[in-house]
Amino acid sequence: MIVALLLVFLGIIWLEVPGLVQKKMWRELIAFSVFMLIGMALSIPQVLGIPVPTPNKPIEALFKPFTQWMLK
């Protein structure tokens, strides 16, 4: 299953990167690379059965004081 996942990621990279390099869209290439790395980092552990932590609690802790201030 992990091989199929890596093949999908490699296929997406193979389709997108040459066009970005040819058009010299360096910022877009960096953004694409960052999002691909995040996607790979989150999907590979899921395929291996490793639980991936949810970002909900840190986001909630960050915005909770703001929402409490807004509701007062």
Image: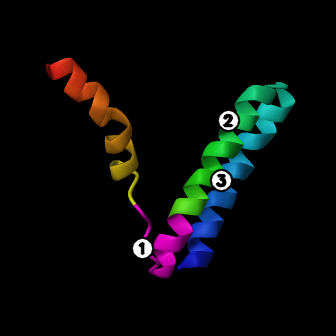
Question: How many callouts does the rendering have?
Answer: 3
**Which x, y percent locates residue 38?**
59, 52
Disc 1 on helix, strand or loop? loop
- What residue is pinned by disc 1? 51
Callout 1 touching callout 3 (CB < 8 Å): no
| Circle 1 or circle 2, nearest the eye | 1
Q: Quadrant of residue 25?
A: top right
Q: What element carries label 2?
A: helix
Q: Is residue 62 magenta?
A: no
Tell which circle, 1 or 2, labels the residue nearer the N-terminal end: 2
Magenta residues span 43-53
Q: Callout 2: few (<14), some (14-19), or many (20+) C-alpha neighbours within 10 Å?
A: few
Quarter of the figure with the C terminus: top left
* Residue for badge 2: 31
Q: Are marks 1 and 2 in contact (CB under 8 Å)?
A: no
Q: Which residue is drawn at 82% across and 25% down?
A: 23
- State the SS at label 3: helix
Q: Is residue 57 above or below residue 5?
A: above
Specify the amino acid type for callout 1.
Pro
Quarter of image, res 41: bottom right
Gap in angstroms between the C-alphas marked 1 and 2: 26 Å
Q: Which amino acid does label 2 sit on?
A: Ala
* Nearest to N terminus: mark 2 or mark 3: 2
Disc 1 from disc 3: Cα separation: 18 Å
The image quadrant of residue 49 is bottom left
Residue corresponding to mark 3: 37
Q: Which amino acid does label 3 sit on?
A: Leu
Q: Residue at 46%, 71% (x, y): give it.
A: 46
Residue 24 to residue 52: above or below: above
